[in-house]
Image (spheres, helix red, strand yellow):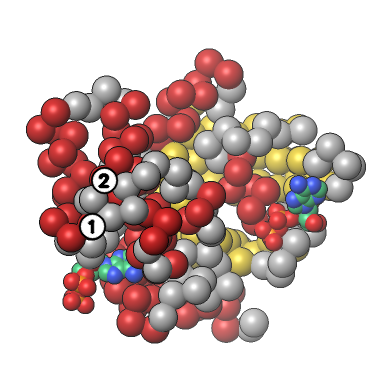
Amino acid sequence: SEALTVEELYYNYPDGTAALRGLSFKLMPGESVALAGPNGSGKSTLLLHLNGLLRPSRGRIAVGGKPLDAAHQAFARRYVGLVFQNPEDQLFMPTVGEDVAFGPQNLGLAGEKLRERVRSVLDQVGLEPARFLERQSFNLSIGEKKRVALAGVLAMEPEVLVLDEPSAGLDPRSRRRLIRLLKDLPQTQLVATHDLDLALEICSRTLIVEQGRLVAEGPSEQILSDR
Ligand code: ADP
Ligand code: ADP
């Protein structure tokens, strides 16, 4: 079945702003899909719904074939890993090691298994554990913070990875490495991005959102060549 299903999703902020206005799409397991569209079109609002941080005003979301309702909230948090655009929104422990350990610890991992998981995801994002485990997160560069945030999400071993502007603010070399890393990940991915080259390189399909609705969808080369 689908990794993620969004059907006729509507969301109004408390001040009345209609941010999502009947959005529908599906992700098949293993697919990488880009989410593009102008600022204010509803991309971040959509992403916040995908692991239950926002509740739809109307419509339906299913993750891994289960409806994203109160009964499946904990399942959704584990199944869908959300990497925020600003890493400072998700790094809150004093050291890198503690930050990356926080999620898997909550899932019940402890001892050597936990330490091994933390080391392995730090390696995966190119942060040498011996050098970074004890570093204070707030002292890192923006690129390093983004990698720690990604490592913390990978440490939960989610089936679906949702990334908000992962390449924003990275220097060209870090951006290349990020693209290489994302390309190699086995997860189903939904990537909100203004970086069309990144979308072309890692996403077989692109969704275009405008004013809270899907206005185009198809193979990335086809959809992005007219933009
Ligand atoms: P994008 O991520 O595509 O830039 P957003 O999801 O951030 O778009 O925003 C969609 C719409 O919702 C915009 O009109 C934006 O101004 C509005 N919006 C975003 N956050 C809030 C909020 N907390 N309260 C009210 N309106 C908001
Ligand atoms: P290399 O020396 O091959 O350029 P590094 O040793 O710096 O690579 O990094 C090893 C791996 O870490 C990369 O292949 C990539 O998977 C990951 N990586 C490095 N930098 C980043 C980054 N900014 N964002 C995400 N992953 C990164």
Question: Residue 203: which quarter of the image?
Answer: bottom left
Q: Residues within 10 Å of mark 2 (few under 14, many from 20)?
A: many
Whether residue 153 is visible: yes
Q: Residue beneath label 1, please?
A: 132
Residue 88 located left or right of residue 101: right
Q: Is mark 2 within 8 Å of ligand 2?
A: no
**Amino acid on which the number 1 mark rests in the picture:** Phe
Q: Tell me the kind of residue under disc 2.
A: Gly
The residue positioned 30% from the left and 50% from the top of the image is 96
Q: Residue at x 80, y 41 (%)?
A: 13
Q: Is residue 124 visible?
A: no
Q: Secondary structure at mark 1?
A: helix
Q: Are marks 2 and 1 in contact (CB under 8 Å)?
A: yes
Q: Position of residue 83 (x, y in %)?
A: 46, 51
The x, y position of residue 100, in whole percent, is 31, 44
Residue 155 x/y as whole percent = 28, 42
Horizontal side, residue 91 vs residue 54: left or right: left
Count of picture labels: 2
Q: Taking 227 as reference, is 33 above or below it?
A: above
Quadrant of residue 81 within the rendered picture: top left
Q: Which mark is residue 97?
A: 2
Residue at 77% across / 33% down in the picture? 57
Q: Assign a secondary structure to mark 2.
A: helix
Q: Where in the figure is residue 213, as x and y percent of width and height?
A: 74, 55
Q: Earlier in the sequence, mark 2 or mark 1?
A: 2
